[in-house]
Image: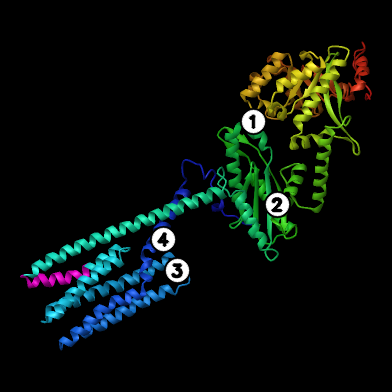
């Protein structure tokens, strides 16, 4: 598929304070187009009055016949023939224009130029004839009729042709000035007639100008109302941030495209930016909005003229590509779109690498209903994100079955919160690097009645998506505190806190209630938060963490080193511990950069007064290296796998025996 550079929507076109040269050019072109439309509107009445045009020629023709009977000269007959010829020409111009099926403004203006030429010639002929008849025919009736014709004709012109003032005033001048010239040449009492004719001429010119000004004001008001309607329609059908069509316009386009099935097929793209939420949470809505505008412009730039791309909301975009296509023909284009949209973004000093995932549905193969096609494209998008992001998937009927299974699992998770015994806590010990049990991390497990143990990686994302995560967090907090209160010894318990729970209401009250209900001292509770929470850098989050610290609760930063790790937030946020991600421990002894990074993290944490803990320790060699690198605490299979709550007392007894640390069999 080919693209055109000019197809791209300008980033921020709806809200940008300044305009690019291209935008200025479009505005100038629009102004010129409006001026042409207005000119065509003003001259259009000339072609609507064919009967009036013919009636306007009756008086001059009648006078020509009358004068021809009063003199033996041939010039009245010549003027009669000229007037008839000009009448036929004007009728031909009008009829020719009216026969056009849908005349454009340019067509109307071309016809108007021909009309003006013939009309000017007619005014010259009429003015000349009236003047000659008054001067050469020594007959009182002829003089009265010729003077009356010239004065009456210009009055009618002032009324009929005020929409074209220059043409009207030209005709008035060409008819009246010969009469004035004759009166001046005769002299005598005709000077009084000249004075009256001049006053009449000035009055007619004033009438034409005022009438034209009224018409222009009316047209201006109509234009402003039309512009307001167009702006309202544009706002209703376009996204204010990106300038792209919005969901309403996309749905209208989908309905139109579906109406052409099955004869005319089309392709539906459903796109979602990868890791956009992380960018939005960490760098704020300003950078997030810039990213959306730039991504939207890139998507539009990848499409063909005639394709439609819309922003559906958030970081979701959709596109319609008219024309029958196959997976083989669309795949290269999808790869190119992902590559172009996923290319690095730079906003000032900020550089971002944000990819895009794409779901594709083909019509009519994948459906003949607009909602169904979009839903199928959404299913394909979900599959693309599940398989690693930054890729695309075509809809497959099996996706619907998998999605149904996912919805079923989500419903089961909702029920598990209400049933006793399905959601359980397992505990994994945390020990000092040189030996000695410190506490346990509470890890949620789901014992499904039919599926058995469901991995957290499978149901935690469902909980976050469905909004159950806050309720689950509250349950885990209460249960972990209750279990820790039963342990023999002052061992702490670490509980993971989701971003949704931290953003929820009355976290401090929920923590205080869980501690009070269990009778657990606050100093024995440790809450683990993710980098996404601290990267929001909101005052509310800072205040919440500070209040937790003041209660005696310790705060640990989980999975440190995998995201936007920054010294700035480590200094500004009230943290007690850095939990180093297991990927660094796994790479110890294999990747040459793992050990220096761990040493730097440990040194930095010590300088900031933070304790470091490494998770995922599985071998004695890893433990020895971590000890050399200055890590303070460790956790992993080397000491114990996570065990059920009832196995914790036995595990405590085992780990507190005065023997060297060694690998233990899985408890429970």
3D distance between C-alphas at marks 4 and 2: 40 Å
* Residue 364, image x, y percentages: 72, 60
Observer-nearest residue: 607 or 207?
Answer: 207
Crowd around label 2: few <14 · some 14–19 · many ≥20 (10 Å): many
Disc 2 is placed on an element classified as: helix
Q: Residue drawn at (64%, 52%), measured in percent from left and top? A: 319
In the current view of this chain or complex, which residue is farthest to the left? 188
* Residue 574, image x, y percentages: 67, 18
Q: Is 116 inside the magenta-drawn segment?
A: no
3D distance between C-alphas at marks 1 and 4: 51 Å
* Residue 598, image x, y percentages: 75, 22
What residue is shown with label 1? 282
- Which mark, residue 103? 3
Disc 1 is placed on an element classified as: helix
Observer-nearest residue: 646 or 607?
Answer: 646
Q: Residue drawn at (71%, 29%), measured in percent from left and top? A: 499
What residue is shown with label 4? 37
Query: Which span is picked out in magenta?
Result: 173-188
Give the mark, 1 or 4, whose residue is nearer the N terminus: 4
Which marked residue is nearer to the observer: mark 3 or mark 1? 3
Is there a contact, CB below 8 Å, between mark 1 and mark 4?
A: no
Give the mark, 3 or 4, whose residue is nearer the N terminus: 4
Crowd around label 1: few <14 · some 14–19 · many ≥20 (10 Å): many
3D distance between C-alphas at marks 3 and 2: 40 Å
- Which mark, residue 374? 2
Crowd around label 3: few <14 · some 14–19 · many ≥20 (10 Å): few
| Chief secondary structure of the magenta portion | helix
Q: Quadrant of residue 456?
A: top right
3D distance between C-alphas at marks 1 and 2: 31 Å
């Amino acid at each position: 598929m080919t693209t055109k550079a000019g197809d791209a929507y300008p980033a921020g076109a709806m809200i940008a304070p300044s305009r690019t040269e291209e935008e200025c050019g479009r505005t100038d072109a629009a102004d010129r187009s409006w001026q042409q439309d207005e000119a065509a509107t003003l001259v259009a009445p000339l072609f609507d009055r064919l009967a009036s045009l013919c009636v306007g020629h009756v008086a001059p023709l009648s006078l020509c016949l009358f004068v021809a009977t009063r003199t033996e000269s041939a010039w009245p007959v010549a003027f009669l023939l000229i007037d008839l010829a000009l009448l036929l020409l004007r009728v031909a111009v009008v009829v020719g224009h009216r026969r056009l099926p849908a005349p454009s403004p340019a067509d109307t203006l071309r016809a108007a130029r021909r009309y003006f030429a013939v009309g000017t010639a007619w005014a010259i002929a009429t003015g000349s004839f009236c003047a000659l008849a008054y001067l050469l025919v020594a007959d009182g009736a002829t003089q009265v009729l010729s003077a009356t014709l010239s004065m009456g004709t210009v009055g009618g012109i002032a009324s009929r042709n005020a929409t074209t003032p220059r043409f009207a005033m030209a005709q008035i001048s060409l008819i009246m000035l010969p009469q004035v010239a004759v009166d001046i040449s005769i002299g005598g009492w005709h000077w009084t007639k000249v004075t009256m004719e001049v006053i009449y001429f000035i009055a007619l010119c004033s009438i034409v100008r005022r009438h034209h000004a009224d018409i222009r004001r009316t047209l201006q008001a109509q234009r402003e109302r039309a512009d307001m309607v167009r702006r309202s329609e544009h706002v209703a059908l376009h996204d204010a941030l990106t300038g792209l069509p919005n969901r309403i316009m996309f749905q209208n386009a989908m309905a139109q495209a579906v109406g052409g099935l099955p004869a005319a097929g089309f392709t539906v793209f459903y796109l979602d930016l990868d890791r956009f939420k992380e960018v939005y949470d960490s760098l704020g809505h300003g950078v997030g909005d810039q990213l959306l505008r730039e991504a939207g412009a890139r998507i539009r730039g990848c499409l063909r003229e005639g394709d439609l791309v819309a922003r559906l909301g958030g970081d979701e975009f959709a596109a319609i590509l008219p024309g029958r296509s196959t997976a083989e023909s669309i795949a290269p284009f999808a790869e190119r779109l992902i590559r172009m949209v996923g290319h690095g973004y730079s906003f000032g000093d900020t550089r971002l690498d944000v990819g895009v995932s794409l779901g594709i549905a083909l019509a009519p193969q994948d459906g003949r209903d607009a909602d169904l096609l979009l839903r199928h494209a959404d299913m394909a998008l979900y599959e693309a994100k599940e398989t690693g992001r930054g890729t695309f998937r075509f809809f497959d009927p099996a996706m619907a079955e998998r999605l149904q299974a996912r919805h079923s699992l989500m419903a089961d998770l909702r029920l598990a919160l209400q049933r006793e015994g399905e959601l359980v806590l397992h505990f994994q010990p945390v020990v000092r690097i040189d030996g000695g049990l410190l506490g346990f991390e509470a890890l949620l497990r789901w014992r499904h009645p039919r599926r058995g143990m469901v991995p957290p990686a499978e149901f935690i994302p469902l909980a976050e998506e469905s909004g159950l995560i806050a309720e689950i967090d509250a349950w885990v907090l209460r249960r972990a505190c209750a279990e820790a209160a039963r342990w023999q010894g002052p061992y702490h318990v670490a509980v993971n806190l989701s971003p949704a729970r931290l953003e929820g209401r009355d976290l401090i009250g929920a923590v205080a209630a869980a501690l009070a209900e269990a009778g657990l001292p606050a100093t024995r509770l440790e809450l683990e938060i993710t980098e996404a929470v601290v990267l929001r850098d909101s005052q509310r989050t800072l205040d919440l963490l500070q209040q937790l610290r003041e209660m005696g609760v310790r705060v640990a930063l989980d999975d440190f080193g995998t995201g936007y790790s920054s010294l700035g937030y480590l200094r500004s946020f009230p943290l007690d511990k850095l939990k180093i991600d297991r990927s660094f421990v796994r790479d110890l002894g294999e990747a040459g950069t793992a050990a220096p990074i761990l040493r730097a993290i440990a040194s930095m944490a010590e300088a900031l007064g933070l304790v470091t803990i490494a998770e995922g320790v599985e071998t004695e060699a890893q433990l020895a290296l971590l000890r050399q690198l200055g890590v303070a605490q460790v956790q992993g299979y080397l000491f114990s796998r996570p065990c059920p709550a009832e196995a914790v007392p036995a595990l405590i007894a085992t780990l507190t025996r005065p023997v060297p640390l060694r690998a233990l069999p899985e408890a429970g």
